[in-house]
Image (tube, grey):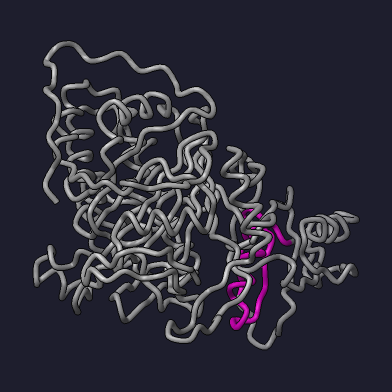
Amino acid sequence: MPTPPRSPRSTAAPRRPQPPTPRGAPRRTAPVGRRPRWGMRAVTTLSVVVLASAGIGHAVMTSLDEDITRVDPFKDMKNRPQAGHGMNILLVGTDGREKISKAERHKYRLGGAPCHCTDTIMIVHISEDRKRASVVSLPRDSYAVMPAHVDRVSGERHHGHPVKLNAAYAEGGPQLTVRTVENMTKVKIDHYLEVDFTSFMKTVDAVGGVPICTTDPLKDSYTGLNLPAGRHTLAGGQALQFVRARHVDGASDLGRMKRQQRFMAALVERLTSSGILLNPMKFRDVTRAVLGSVRADKGFGTDEMLDLGRAMRNFSPSSSEFTTVPIGRMGYAVKGVGSTLKWDAEKSERLFHALRQDQPLSVHRSRGAARIVPVAPQQIRVQVENGTRTAGLGHRVDAALASTGFRTTKAPVNSPVRDVRRTIVAHDPRWDRSAKSLAAALPGSELRTVKGLGPTLKVIAGADFERVRKVRAEDPGQGEFGVVQGDEVACS
């Protein structure tokens, strides 16, 4: 699409920030990138917002703004939802694999033809006070009823009909995608951003890689992802494999969305904690990587990026929250469409009402309040033994574990060995994930494998015991919408 004509730019001093938009006032629209995938797109979008916080001059941002390809997703739209408070950005991504070299397509398993449809769809809500970002993932296979429209390829006029949500882009591009999302959510979209593989990979490389932590090995033969458990710094290509992986577990797209959300949180933390935003040259390089393959609406330009960036200068992972629209029915079969995901009507309405009212989706839990572990404490059976001669230590440890959710026997006993210095977590090798979760709750404890011990883990309290740390499962499904904050899914 040709770039629309631009008004002459002044070479004078940078403009002063514009006053905030009053409540209820109509909002101007924002930009997006060309084609990437789920996490990558949202990641790139959020990074645009954060990157502007570096305070780089207006002239630099203006030159970068000219690299953005513009679209008009709001053309001739009528009967739109009423504007709420804050800013709503529809972040979408298509694969754009045709722009990647043959060698890279082979290396990162990007074979096949591009689908020319949205592989990722997110609503990113920036609160009116610019202190919070709420990201809601909309599964691409969501059951949707597309509004009446003219097919952009065939020119044929279609009446409203059921489809999977990602088909809206294939039939009607950005405009039909925005219309469909607004009809389903009743959330007015203020800006549209569209990103692609190339932009995503370049952005990750420009920031020096993004740290990811995983408690379990992640392997997906379709994307080539192969990560052992632990902490990793992912470069662009490997990060692309991470956010595209759908066959790591049985959760398919829903699992992939969670990994993409985790990656977004990690990227935000990388940007805000590494000094990148304070280094003008690094800032310029990262911003060019972000905007080079982006498509965005005409209303989100230099002034919008700078104003939002200044307001969000102190943005961090703890300022963000992530969730997926509540699903009421998996595998909902629709004739001519196939298997879809049907939203839970009541829960979804409450979720989108919160966005419209600029309300947080969850009550924030301070970082460190509960460490994330692979197995929930409620699923772990524990027998406590006192490995010291300190009277009552076994009962104290048992009570502390029980109070944090572990299923203790409530009948601690004395260990045959009474001179244990370091607390021991003994476990059958078949229950190693549970053992790691239990050990995380006992700082400084030692893991010890005991074949044939069975499903009940044993804690032998040592002289070093001080406290039990709170832990929770990696996917806690907290609250009605299963929301997690960015600092809960980023590496600790």
Closest to the observer: 296 or 310? 296
Q: Position of residue 32 (x, y in %)?
A: 28, 47
Q: Is residue 238 left or right of residue 453?
A: left
Q: Position of residue 148 (x, y in %)?
A: 40, 64
Asked whether 199 falls inside the magenta stretch, the response is: no
Residue furthest left as drawn: 102
Closest to the observer: 455 or 460? 455
Closest to the observer: 190 or 210? 190
Count of marks overlaid on the render: 0
* Residue 108 visible (yes or no): yes
**Residue 60 versus residue 107 in the image, above or below:** above
Q: Position of residue 99 (x, y in %)?
A: 12, 63
| Residue at position x 46%, y 76% in the image | 252
Quadrant of residue 242 in the image? bottom left
* Residue 233 visible (yes or no): no
User: Magenta region: which residues?
Assistant: 420-448
| Residue at position x 36%, y 33% in the image | 28
